[in-house]
Amino acid sequence: MWYSAAACSLAQWCSPLYESSPNEAALLKQGGPGVLWRAALYMVVASALFATMNALAKYLLLANTGQPIGALQMTFGRYFFGTLFLLPVLFGAKVVPRTKHPFKYMFRASFGVAGVALMFLAIAVIPLANATAIGFSSPIFAMIFAVLLLGERSGPYRWLAAAVGFMGVIVIAGPDASIFGAASLFAVAAAVCMGGEIAAVKWLSGLGDRALIMLFFGNLFGAILGGLAAIPAWVSPQPMEWLIFAAMGLVAIAGQRLVLHAMAMADANFVAPFLYSTLLFSGLFGVLLFDEVLRPSLFLGMALIVGSGLLLARFGR
């Protein structure tokens, strides 16, 4: 989704969207702690933006504003406004949005749309922090897709990391020994789809298109697919709902921009762990805005998933 894991992987495998500002260029030349902590700050702010997007989606899903807006229509709104907000970026960068691989981008977007829609379905019925934590297991599924479809090899430490992360998913999704409830299955399915999107992004990164082009077509085709899927149950949004759609698109694009900037300024192994602060912001929003309760099993599962992610970053490529 726009989502944290996909944005992080996009940043690792693609070049930055923007040139560094003069101040950042000076910091890069200077090096040292100033650059590292600026990059870390970017990642923390991006994490807050990603959590904000999910909180906005949950608010809209639970709001009593007449006919409820469905997850597919909300997914369309997120991608549609993401595309609109990228247009001035393309103009400023003097980049013409064209590619020789539209069907490959459509294939990538199908994973993204499915992942976002499933995550929206999940956050409507389970706590934000739970859904977000399960979503962070997407690199596990990305690794599996990369092995099966891209021919990559994974050593024993990466498989150990995957096993640890999946244990975390089970702890969060099935604290009552039911393993997976229907609602948690939405979040797990979303993580699988986001893992597929991450693998697709890596596949597309070998085609030679710039990161800005990849991001634009990911949003454009996401809007097309999301819109087509939403037509059968389309509800005319109220003005406030359009504003929330626009806010979701804006914070998603801004968060991805900050992630890419951070990855350009510092090594991925240093900055990627700061993306896990999304869990903290999601838990905070859930408690303050939706009266959610954070169970002890959530923190144990979070620890396992974060540990899995750090192991994957340490032993991955």
Image (cartoon, rainbow, N blue to C red):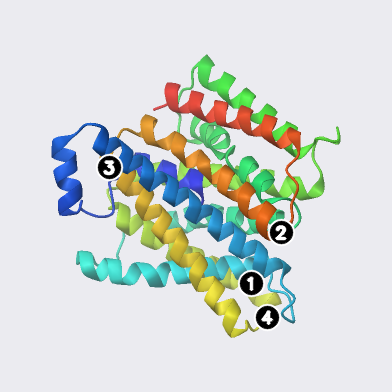
Looking at the rendered structure, the number of numbered marks drawn on it comes to 4
Residue designated by label 4: 235
* Labels 3 and 1 touching (C-beta < 8 A): no
Whole-angstrom CA distance, mark 4 to mark 2, is 24 Å
Residue designated by label 3: 264
User: Given the image, on which type of amino acid does mark 1 rest?
Assistant: Ala
* Labels 2 and 1 touching (C-beta < 8 A): no
Quarter-wise, where is residue 31 in the image? top left
- Depth-wise, is mark 4 or mark 1 nearer the camera? 4
Q: Residues within 10 Å of mark 2 (few under 14, many from 20)?
A: some
Lower sequence index among marks 4 and 2: 4
User: Given the image, on which type of amino acid does mark 4 rest?
Assistant: Val
Looking at the picture, tell me which residue is in the foreground, 153 or 73: 73
Whole-angstrom CA distance, mark 4 to mark 3, is 41 Å
Lower sequence index among marks 4 and 3: 4
Secondary structure under tag 3 reads helix
Q: Is residue 188 above or below residue 52?
A: above
Q: Is residue 74 above or below residue 241?
A: above
Residue designated by label 2: 290
Residue designated by label 1: 230
Could you tell me which residue is drawn at 63 percent across and 24 percent down? 164
Secondary structure under tag 4 reads loop
